[in-house]
Image: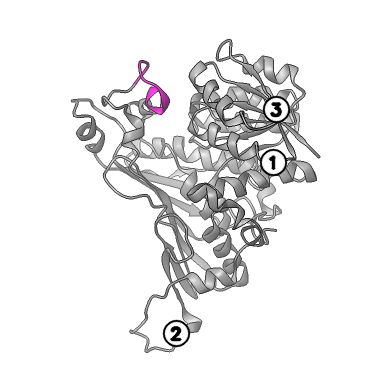
Amino acid sequence: MKIRLGFIGMGRRGLRHLAMLSERADCAIVAIAEPLPAQNALAQKILAQKTHRPIFYDKNEQDYQRMIAQENLDAVLIYTPWKEHLAQSQFAMQHGVRVGVEVSGAQSLEECWQFVETYEQTQTPIMLLENCCYRRDVLAIAQMIKNGDFGELVYLKGGYQHDIRSVLFDEKLNFGAETQGESNWRTQEYLERNADIYPTHGLGPMAIFNDINAGNRITQVRSLATKSVGMKNFCQKNIAFKLGDIVLTQMQCERGEVMQLTHDTSLPRPFNLGLMVQGSKGIWQEYYRGDLSDGQIYLEKNDAAAPLEKRWQSPKKYLRKNDSSIWVKFRKKITKFGRYGIDYIMLNDFIERIQQGKEFRIDVYDLATWKAITPLSEQSIQANGKMIEMPDFTKGKYIDRKNKFKNYE
């Protein structure tokens, strides 16, 4: 079954995913909605040696509506500034077009409910394109949790720890309407909000590990933020950025676990998700980008040392033993994509679930729950770290829902 695809937005992520999907014989790149000529030229360059000849809808920022109405698409992929995601997703879903939408936090709690209500009214599926859920180490750890290697889970950590200030400012250290790329719009979030504005890279894997919306749920959230110095130091301007350099969010879960999330993007540091899983029989923690040897593990069943002589081990042999079949299948093919191999795995899942008529692994209820961390953390910080209730976007269905990432095939 060949899937007819449309794209909204040709920024960095959109172009990268366009290149990957254009290699698939089971995908037809039918149309692209992007108002900027320079970005459309980059898309045409990617497709120059391919058979795809999409129609470009480039009259204005609303021209995506004409594309969706006219092109008989099976699915649309959205890579636009965060504030546009809801309206674009709703329009597609209301026209019966499946949606894959780039990650972000929600602008409000009401926005999360609107995603859910639109799905429930239209029954048109939507998937949050969270690539970190498809990392090789994440899928292997999910299998180890299922096997009982860590025992009963107690505490989990994760986050988005990545100095992205070079993206938030142009080469002249400016941002705003006169600049191009993410400095045109994303930096404004740092001026206006004090919250975990990008929660899903860390929360997605933790939600998989801890069966969130699949027998378990987040019940309460509280957050604290540090002062802000990193953005001002970087741009060398006396600007009052509202977003704290570090935002810590703790989440209480119904089964008794605590999960901790960190947003850390405006101080000098290497990339890390800071994932950690701790249970009654062991602990794993990773660093950097998810190679099987990136991190350390301790499993009680393998420890022959004295009680006070516990030692970390490399996780490589354990993760390799529990390698996901999808990574075994595609490992050689995705080598050319480097660290973006996880995007290929994610997009493959998006396409195959459509072809098979199956629910997306990351569905609208996950989308709403994960994105809700942003407004809830904002409320908590404003209230000096007060616990805030997390809505149950599934309306009770989480009790019987299954974790679609464990037993990944």
Q: CA distance from mark 2 to mark 1?
A: 46 Å
In the image, what residue occupies the spot 47% across and 73% down? 282
State the image quarter where residue 288 is shown: bottom left
- Position of 93 relative to 399 (above/below): above
Asked if the residues shown at circle 2 and circle 3 are in contact, with their CB atoms under 8 angstroms apart, the answer is no
Q: Is residue 21 left or right of residue 258?
A: right
Span highlighted in magenta in the image: 176-185
Asked if the residues shown at circle 3 and circle 1 are in contact, with their CB atoms under 8 angstroms apart, the answer is no
Whichever of callouts 2 and 1 sits on the residue coming sooner in the sequence is: 1
Residue under label 1, please give it: 24
**Label 1 SS:** loop
State the image quarter where residue 186 is shown: top left
Residue 231 position, x and y percent, is 26, 34
Identify the disc placed on residue 93. 3
Identify the disc placed on residue 303. 2
Quadrant holding the C terminus: bottom right
**Label 2 SS:** loop
Numbered disc in front, either 3 or 1: 1
Of residues 79 and 36, the one drawn nearer to the viewer in this rendering: 36
- Crowding around mark 1 (Cα neighbors within 10 Å: few <14, some 14 to 19, many 20+) is some
Whichever of callouts 2 and 3 sits on the residue coming sooner in the sequence is: 3
Of the residues shown, which amino acid type is indicated by label 2? Answer: Asp
In the displayed image of the protein, which residue is found farthest to the top? 59
